[in-house]
Amino acid sequence: MNYLSVENVSRSYGEKILFENISLGINQGQKIGFVAKNGFGKSSLLNIITGAELPNSGAVNKRNDLRMAFLSQEPDLNPNITIEDAILDSDIPTMKVIANYERALKNMDDSEAYQKAFDAMERHNAWDFETKYKQILSKLRLDDLEQKIGTLSGGQKKRIAMAMALLSDPQLLIMDEPTNHLDLEMIEWLEAYFKQEDYTILMVTHDRYFLDRVCNEIIELDSGKLYTYKGNYSYYVEKKEERLAVEQTTQEKTQQLYKKELQWMRRQPKARTTKSKSRIDDFYKIKEAAHNRRKDHQVELEINMERLGTKVVELHKVSKSFPGKNLINNFSYNFLKGERVGIIGKNGTGKSTFLNLITNRLQPDNGKIVVGETVKIGYYTQAGMDIKPGQKVIDVVKEYGEYIPLTKGKIISASQLLERFLFDSKKKHDFVEKLSGGERKRLYLCTVLIQNPNFLILDEPTNDLDIPTLNVLENFLMDFPGCLVVVSHDRYFMDKIVDHLFVFNQSGNITDFPGNYSDFRAYVGNTDIALDKDDDTAQGEKETPKTEVPVVATAPLGPTREQQKTVSRLENKIKKLEEQRDELQKSFLNTDLSPDQLTENSIALEKTKKELEETEMEWLELMDQIS
């Protein structure tokens, strides 16, 4: 059954054409992921489909009785009402029945009104709906329904809008970045919910695991054209590579033909026969096709960061709490060169507080934080940057630096850095107010990177970034030689770039887990286990439920989970210490080192060797216990 058809729709803003004469149909049961680069028209097409925006040409036709809900990136909610009022007053017929019943309960003296409200509850089967209503609110952690909308964060408002969209029981659900501001537990619950509920979905999201697990079709908007892939995100990636390979082969053949025809044209045939004129016309068509090269701006970042000393960042028994909330409890850790740490935990468990402590924006209640003299921190915050009225894109970056050094003695200017981050010549000189949310995030990344940090902190860097930009950022971070600390709800992103995790717990404890997010989920089985419990779980001692098996021997069957975890941690530490030792040994070959630097490196080398020897001994003793 066809729900909605987009027919020959075009949209442009001034001279900028987003798309022309594109068509698509949405049928019952489809779960479509819509992907495109930022600024290429994703949100505009969603707005046209929902009627929030008009196309320049073409039309959108939908069934007269179609129930449709739209979850926008930035929900427009009345700040003066409570959460409960917002939900009860929404355009949801059953919610109005429940609202009337709630009002009748408060005025039991009016028996006629109560009976009428009770009968309506029966007629609309609202009792079952109320159960669903409470479940969704609970999963989205909307517990205090008396809070005013105006007092809530952007994430809380997004969750309210999500609840309203789900409760409206739509046949077609359209969502723009639904996972933004949701924590990992909520995202995974939403994945399972969409699998079991009979929704037809069209969504824009940068969350690649979400696309992979929810969608059965991917539609890509690329250079004004739509490409459809009948499968999930993994299928799309595979088939897109095949399409690009075919396009590349065709492009090469076209260019060869163009060169051949160019030689013929240069001979300037004098006899303008009908045949030669036709060939000339064909030549210009071939020329146009040959010059229509794809503009896949590949970002190649080869930043030459400043050298890190032996002391990076050390936390000694650090604690931090706020009234009624203990966020960090007696945490100690020494960062080593090249560490890549991911931070996960429920919203409100202290992740951003931890980053603010490291960057000296907050002071600990107890303990101390020591930052090495050579450490240069780059901090990408959720809040983003302040935009001054009338500022141009290039001027924003130049405020932080004119250039950054690259390897092999080269440099890159602020303008070139912007180009590498997909800002073309025109966009570089646009006013910042004209940029989309994703483009502002890209610009913010440029301002952080041009400062050439060697200790990079990223707090939710993937929000509002398109998938091509995420690939660019991931490729840079994979090669980044300094320390990296990342808070993100993007599981695909975390799996690709981090080596181990700090798992934040409601009790204020922090677990150092040796692996990426998928390793963590495989270990604990469910986010509730590690993120909700107190001390035992925070120390990683909670195990997944085991299947009953017959006991065939009294001897241990192998290392325990705790032993496996410790082995992994020690091996990771040994590897880093060996790299640190080798780097210090190589430094003595540098004839430019001063006597003081040589002395400092000698002391650091001895300290590293001693720590390496102790760690190797600890590893050997543990392996003896296991064997």
Image (tube, helix red, strand yellow):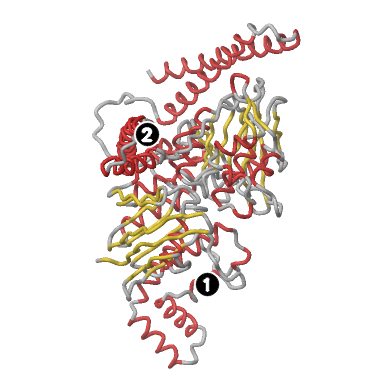
Q: Amino acid at mark 2?
A: Gln
Camera sees residue 178: no
How would you rate the neighbour count of disc 1 (Cα within 10 Å): few for under 14, some for 14-19, many for 20 or more?
Answer: many
Camera sees residue 597: yes
**Quarter of the image where the N terminus is located:** bottom left
Above or below, comparing residue 80 to residue 160 in the picture: below
Name which residue lies at 32% across and 65% down.
5
Which is more toward the observer, 576 or 35? 35
From the image, tell me which residue sits under label 2. 268
Task: Place residue 198 in its image quadrant.
Answer: bottom left
Image coordinates of residue 240 in percent, x first then y, are 33, 41
Q: Amino acid at mark 1?
A: Ala
Image coordinates of residue 158 in percent, x first then y, are 52, 60
Give the SS element for disc 1: helix
Q: Which of the two discs, 2 and 1, labels the residue nearer the N terminus?
A: 1
The residues bearing labels 2 and 1 have C-alpha atoms spaced at a distance of 74 Å
Give the SS element for disc 2: loop
From the image, tell me which residue sits under label 1. 86
Above or below, comparing residue 347 to residue 619 in the picture: below
Q: In the image, is 407 to the left or to the right of 253?
A: right
How would you rate the neighbour count of disc 2 (Cα within 10 Å): few for under 14, some for 14-19, many for 20 or more?
Answer: few
Name which residue lies at 39% across and 53% down.
34
